[in-house]
Image (cartoon, helix red, strand yellow):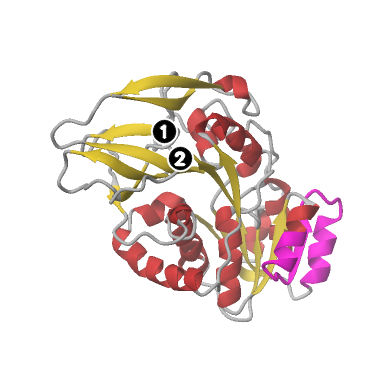
Amino acid sequence: MIKSREVRLKSRPIGPVALENFELATVNVPSPQDGEALIKNLWMSIDAGQRTLMGSGDADIADLPPKRFELNEPMECQAIGQVIESHDSNLPVGTFVSSNFGWREYFVFKGKQDGFTLTKLEVPVSPLQAHLHIMSVYGATAYYFITQCAKVQAGETVWISTAAGTTGSMACQIAQISGCKVIGTTGSDRKVEWLMEELGLDAAFNYHAPDLRDAIKAACPEGIDVYLDFVGGHQLETAIDLMNPQGRIIKVGETSSYDGGKTDGPGNLFQIVLKRLDLLGRSVFDILAQPARMENVYARLGKWHADGTIKVQETVYEGIENAAQAQIDLLGGKNIGKMLVKVGEPENIR
């Protein structure tokens, strides 16, 4: 038996998430039995979409899959861990694994449980946490949104919102690789600077600026061909105004309303008809349903990661006790790139 700390959802947030909505509890994790394995989590992923699973927000998904988090139970997220004790021949001690059992330090994996599975990392990449960004569903999703949904062509102008986030920043770089002119919007001047200096975007803007529409129009006199929309609200309305005829809008999120915020819908939707725009709704779960396709995508992403073609910035919080604050700060836009929590150090197992 081993002691483990876990983060539970204590109450459903009304408005922005606060520390009082979480509880850090200490539990006893039993030793693994036949066919089971004890996993020590090393890294966990913090994502904006987890806010919808907490409930009581504008984007509450109580009646839609995936199932929202239960009160007074440990939450779930993608995590990377290591097998430290095992009675499962398929999971030898020392094996690195990916699972949905984040928000806790240790857990016993009992085979397939509650619809979740644990995946062995047969060839772990370096750094190990890359399996939570570029070599994860987030990298595959960025590739899918840009190449398969938007079907970008060289010479097109692509606008990506939340461009300094995990998926957004990778989508920017994949569009650049595809030969597109890429502009991004983000929530702070510090992030604008990062997008311009580190990623080399053609233009980047703080979406809080009062003259956002005019600034984007000046930077893109040729108009916008593709808009990747993570946020909705006034940015979507601005994009519709500036889209070229037959342009494509890929709607993949609504972060402006995730944390209990209220946003007005675009008042110019009829332009979608007048301009013959394509408006396509897509989700991270679309790519999860295509594991065979993901293998090919990971091979390409792995090459780009190894040779430095795609850069990933990490914002790292240390310790499970700081995981709730990491979630709050992510929703408050304080991260650049991928928000991670380092839960523990790998064991030196020979």
Alpha-carbon neighbours of circle 2 within 10 Å: few (<14), some, or many (≥20)?
some
Q: Amino acid at mark 2?
A: Gly
Q: Residue at x 75, y 63 (%)?
A: 204
In the image, the segment drawn in magenta is 193-220
Q: Nearer the viewer, residue 4 or 150?
A: 4
Q: Label 1 vs label 2: CA separation?
A: 8 Å
Report whether 191 appears left or right of 179.
right
Quick check: marks 1 and 2 in contact, CB under 8 Å?
A: yes
Report if residue 199 lies within the magenta region: yes
Q: Residues within 10 Å of mark 1 (few under 14, many from 20)?
A: many
Q: Tell me residue 181's x, y (percent).
A: 67, 75
On the rendered image, what quadrant is the N terminus found in? Answer: top left
Residue 206 position (above or below residue 151): above
| Residue behind mark 2 | 344
User: Residue placed at 81% from the left, 56% from the top?
Assistant: 212
| Image quarter of residue 192 | bottom right
List x then y, in percent, for residue 13: 58, 23
Res. 105 mark? 1
Residue located at (47% from left, 53% from top): 129
- Observer-nearest of 160 and 169: 169
For numbered disc 2, what is the local secondary structure? loop
Q: Residue 36: where, in percent of width, then height?
A: 19, 36
**Callout 1 secondary element:** loop
Q: Residue 89: x and y, percent?
A: 14, 46
Identified by mark 1, the residue type is Glu
Q: Earlier in the sequence, mark 1 or mark 2?
A: 1
Q: Nearer the viewer, residue 235 or 328?
A: 328
Residue 31 lies within the magenta run:
no
Q: Which mark is residue 233?
A: none
